[in-house]
Image (cartoon, rainbow, N blue to C red):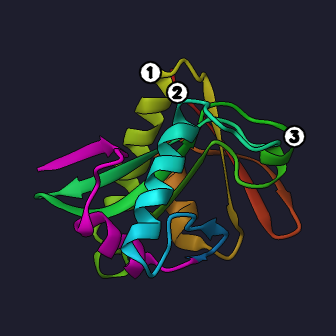
Amino acid sequence: MVELRKLTTNDGTDVFEMVQEIGKGENGFTNSLYSEDFSIFQEKLVRNYEMSEGINLKPQFVPQTIYWLYVDGKPVGYGKLRHYLNQHLLQHGGNIGYAIRPMDRGKGYARILLKKLVQESKEKRIDQVLLTCYESNKASIKVIESNGGELRDKKDGDCFYWINTN
């Protein structure tokens, strides 16, 4: 069974271990939840929950909701959905970022995760979402295009894809 779960402040060691395996980030994805200490991870959960509600946002930040992708009761990846774009996000990051834990890559989970994140975007009344990825990241390009991503620009090795949510 595949399900998308919204981050909660009570998420446990299963999610912590997945975040650890993903590492600090790669291919332009920053794993902002990464920590080697579980108590710091729990603090980051609280900050990210607040961010999803628009509470205590730092300047230049926008509300962002984090979702975990679970398969058969195990977290296999996560995605970030930014509720709207500012000037910085139009150039770096876009509305959606995602990562799959290394041992679960190549199984189609990124495609499923992105599809579900696009559905969440629609529920938040976001008409189209921007995703950026490195031109060299062929796997992510395939995932984005399989979800209806339309390449609208390339700049300095970055691809800018838009997906209509309607």
Quarter assignment of residue 90: top right
Give the distance between the C-alpha atoms of the residues marked 1 and 2, in whole angstroms: 9 Å
Which residue is labeled 3 in the image? 87
Left/right placement of residue 63 relative to residue 122 reads right
Which residue is labeled 2 in the image? 165
Upstream in sequence: badge 3 or badge 2: 3
Upstream in sequence: badge 3 or badge 1: 3
Give the distance between the C-alpha atoms of the residues marked 3 and 1, in whole angstroms: 23 Å
Label 3 vs label 2, nearer the camera: 3
For badge 2, the amino acid type reads: Thr
| Secondary structure state at the residue bearing disc 2 | loop
For badge 1, the amino acid type reads: Glu
Callout 2: few (<14), some (14-19), or many (20+) C-alpha neighbours within 10 Å? some
Query: Residue 138: which disc?
Result: none
Question: Does the stretch in magenta take in 3?
Answer: yes
Residue at x 59% of width, y 23% of height:
126
**Which one is nearer the viewer's eye here, 12 or 83?**
12
Give how far across and how far down residue 29 sits, in percent: 61, 66
Give the distance between the C-alpha atoms of the residues marked 3 and 2, in whole angstroms: 21 Å
Report the span colored magenta. Answer: 1-24
Give how far across and how far down residue 153 sits, in percent: 82, 50
Question: Does residue 100 appear in this view?
Answer: no
Q: Is residue 55 above or below residue 113?
A: above
Which residue is labeled 1 in the image? 123
Q: Is residue 16 above or below residue 161?
A: below
Callout 1: few (<14), some (14-19), or many (20+) C-alpha neighbours within 10 Å? few
